[in-house]
Amino acid sequence: MSDDLFVSAAAGKPTAGKPAATGPAGKPGAPGPAPGAPDPAAGIRTAARVAETSEGAQELLVRPATPPGELRRELGAVLRLPEGGVLDPGDIDVERRDDETMIINMGPQHPSTHGVLRLMLELDGETVLRTKPVIGYLHTGMEKTGEELTYVQGTTNVTRMDYLSPLNNELVFCLATEALLDIELPPRAVWIRMLMSELQRVSSHLMWMATNGMDLGSTSMMIYGFREREMVLSFFEKATGLRMNNNYIRPGGVAADLPDGWEDDVEVICETVLARTYEYDELLTGQPIFRERTEGIGNLTAEEALALSATGPILRSTGVPWDLRRTMPYLAYDQVDFDVIVGTYGDNFDRYSVRLNEIRESIRIIRQVAERMPPGDYRVQDRKVTPPPRARIDESMEALIHHFKVFTEGFRVPEGEVYVAIESPRGELGCELVSDGTSKPYRMHIRGPSFVNLQTVPLLLRGGLIADAVAVVSSVDPVMGEVDR
Amino acid sequence: MTALLPEVPAAPGRHAAEVAFPDRERYRAQVAAYRDAGFELCADLCAVDYLTHPGRWLPEGVTPERFEVVVNLLSLSQKRRVRVRVQVPERDPVVDSVVDVYPGADAMEREAYDLMGIVFTGHPDLTRILMPEDWEGHPLRKDYGVGRVPVQFKEAPGPR
């Protein structure tokens, strides 16, 4: 079966206006929706209504089978309208007859979809008309799992969501837990967290530079990006014991103090990566081929980005100076000096520049943190939340009990609910935590920035060339572990 | 400045300027009122199933129901957040969609429908987003047990 590649090629169908999909065609408003008079029921497409089409309910349908409301949404028309207005389907500027277009499938195993993202693309020749990201291939029910784990174990779960910035996931979960616990962290714990999350941002953006380079055909950038990222990961291994999925930031502080000589390691990373970012400038920023492939591709306006809830480098590339580290400071970001990088046009090149310059800003922060790292405890000395030092367990019965309680039952968190958000390398990473007073979260919801940002892909791809689709998807920087959770 | 509609109970929130508790009839209007008051971005929308945790605190005049849809709105110009919590009963888990107010709520509402079974009327494409489309049940509900998928290999235990 060639179903994988060609889901539905409507070309050559003699009967225009009839859904090309097999099955009981004609159920969801088959003979072309009447313009201007949308059937209220046709606005909602449920699994039951289109279960029998070959594409399936979650996927992109051929035009005649698509309800008008859905078609308008897919074409981005909702965004070009004043609030609440309804566009006449005839106004949609890319109006194609069904036999001119075809729907093809990209992914979920396409090497440039950054994991298992599947894109359904409606093409007219080489021009992309409609796109629908189909996700869920990596769904492992982590929010459900989170309800079965104690708060102490919870960080091991959330850290696996965004696997390119695991420490940020741990951080937002811990901040939410601590907000419910209402505990104050010692300054050293706060600054260690800040150091680690900025290093994580550097490594995540380097990884993005690498994959973006590869998607655009610059394999040297891929090798360089991975090489520099490895330096950061080596430091993580030294400090936390693991390169990824560190489980280092825990409720009440961090798992361990920084290793001896960490200042030197961090300074070497800062110096090397900063110098190398200027090499990337030579390799990519000024390079004509790279600029041709990125400038003016995948444009987004600030209004569109806000309407689609896009955050992070995507929002900043459109010129909106919104960075939670600056605008709603958490940890001690209000005490360090850094710039919020914004773009102008919201195209691929701006998203590239924002990320490249954010690496430099993160290095600025890291240097300040390394200079001003306060002494003291690296976690709260509240034995109901954090375990006692290992040596104390041999001496004190009470310490042994506390250790045992923390790692078996965990600690109880007062009833309540909270939403905490931080700026992850991909945007606003939020954690909605509901506690019922036990030692396990009653509900743990992670607002993954990639999941939300993925909604911009249909708009970014619309009207562009299929060859740019890879570059655009890459510039959105989706991490499928976080999208599907 | 407040954008609360009349007769919508509210409470101060943690990490949020205020938490509004509209009923289902005024939910969409309340979200739209916040949008008009300068909350440009719908940061998050999720659903909570309070089946096994009935005694939560709610302001006076709000009847607790099994489900709750929580919307987190963000104002970039005022640098503050508000939360909207709407109670959704178990027998009729239907609530208005806010996609026409915030197009970015699209994927979030699909996720809430998929995993919690909340039906958003007016959503243009209310299909499953994370689970396979022939999946039965809504996994994040509290009465949906874990470990229900039979494994194809070994003598794995069947559905329980």
Image (tube, grey):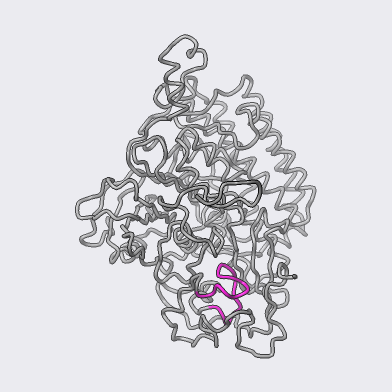
Q: Is residue A241 above or below residue A75?
A: above
> Looking at the image, can residue A367 be seen?
yes
Magenta segment's dominant SS is: loop
At horizontal 69% and vertical 74% (from top left) the residue drawn is A127
Nearer to me, B102 or A350: B102
Q: Position of residue A96 (x, y in %)?
A: 63, 83
Toward which corner of the image does residue A205 lie, by quadrant? top right
Q: Is residue B127 above or below residue A264?
A: below
Magenta residue span: A49-66
Residue A63 sits inside the magenta stretch? yes
> Looking at the image, can residue A307 be seen?
no
At horizontal 61% and vertical 56% (from top left) the residue drawn is A137
Task: Give the mark count.
Answer: 0
Q: Is residue B99 above or below residue A378?
A: below
The quadrant of the rendering that contains the N terminus of chain A is bottom right
Name of the residue lying farthest toward the front:
B155
Q: Position of residue A309 (x, y in %)?
A: 48, 59
Q: Position of residue A295 (x, y in %)?
A: 68, 62
Nearer to me, A220 or A109: A109
Q: Position of residue A280 (x, y in %)?
A: 73, 46
Nearer to me, A465 or A23: A23
At horizontal 48% and vertical 43% (from top left) the residue drawn is A146
Looking at the image, residue A86 sits to the left or right of residue A350; the answer is left
Name of the residue lying farthest toward the top:
A395
Toward which corner of the image does residue A176 lie, by quadrant? top left
Toward which corner of the image does residue A265 lie, by quadrant? top right
Residue A348 sits inside the magenta stretch? no
Looking at the image, residue B155 sits to the left or right of residue A174; the answer is right
